[in-house]
């Protein structure tokens, strides 16, 4: 089974630069049992870092199993949110942009 670190890297591979035009956003992923990562979308580029980013526009909080399901496309983000497996802090509408920026 792939690690959270492997799955977070898939976001850079799936990045849709056209959807990111003009955006300057930071997505914070707090994986309760596997560490924190942040993903910066700026100037049509995507950068993943381990750790926290104080400038995060939205923070998504979940366990590793939920994250891996979301990253692989097996888990629907809205469904995970409704089931309480995914919590957000900050601008929740930006969380909805993840599917647009990182198509499966």
Image (spheres, grey):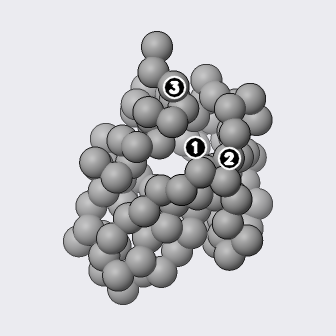
Q: Residue pushed farthest top?
A: 1
Give the CA distance from mark 2 to mark 3: 13 Å
Residue 85 can be seen in this image: no
Disc 2 vs disc 1: Cβ atoms closer than 8 Å?
Answer: no
Q: Quadrant of the C terminus?
A: top left
Labelled disc at residue 36: 2
Labelled disc at residue 40: none
Labelled disc at residue 78: 1
Instruction: Indicate the position of residue 32 as horizontal and vertical percent values.
Output: 76, 35
Of mark 2 and mark 3, the one earlier in the sequence is 3
Q: Which residue is drawn at 51% across and 25% down?
A: 3
Q: Residue at x 57, y 43 (%)?
A: 78
The residue labelled by disc 3 is 3
Label 2: how many Cα within 10 Å (few below 14, some 14–19, many 20+) = some
Instruction: Indicate the position of residue 65 as horizontal and vertical percent values.
Output: 61, 23
Camera-nearest residue between 104 and 80 = 104
* Residue 20 sits in quarter: bottom left
Of mark 2 and mark 1, the one earlier in the sequence is 2
Count of number-bearing discs: 3
Disc 2 vs disc 3: Cβ atoms closer than 8 Å?
Answer: no
Label 1: how many Cα within 10 Å (few below 14, some 14–19, many 20+) = few
Secondary structure, mark 1, is: helix
Q: Residue at x 33, y 71 (%)?
A: 45
Secondary structure, mark 3, is: loop
Secondary structure, mark 2, is: strand
């Amino acid at each position: 089974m792939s690690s959270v670190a492997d799955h977070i890297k898939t976001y850079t591979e799936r990045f849709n630069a056209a959807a990111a035009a003009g955006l300057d956003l930071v997505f914070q992923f707090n994986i309760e049992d596997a560490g924190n990562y942040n993903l910066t979308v700026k100037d049509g580029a995507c950068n993943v870092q381990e750790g926290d980013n104080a400038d995060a526009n939205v923070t998504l909080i979940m366990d590793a199993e939920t994250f891996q399901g979301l990253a692989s496309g097996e888990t629907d983000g809205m469904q995970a949110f409704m089931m309480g497996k995914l919590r957000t802090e900050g601008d929740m509408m930006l969380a909805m942009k993840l599917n647009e920026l990182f198509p499966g």
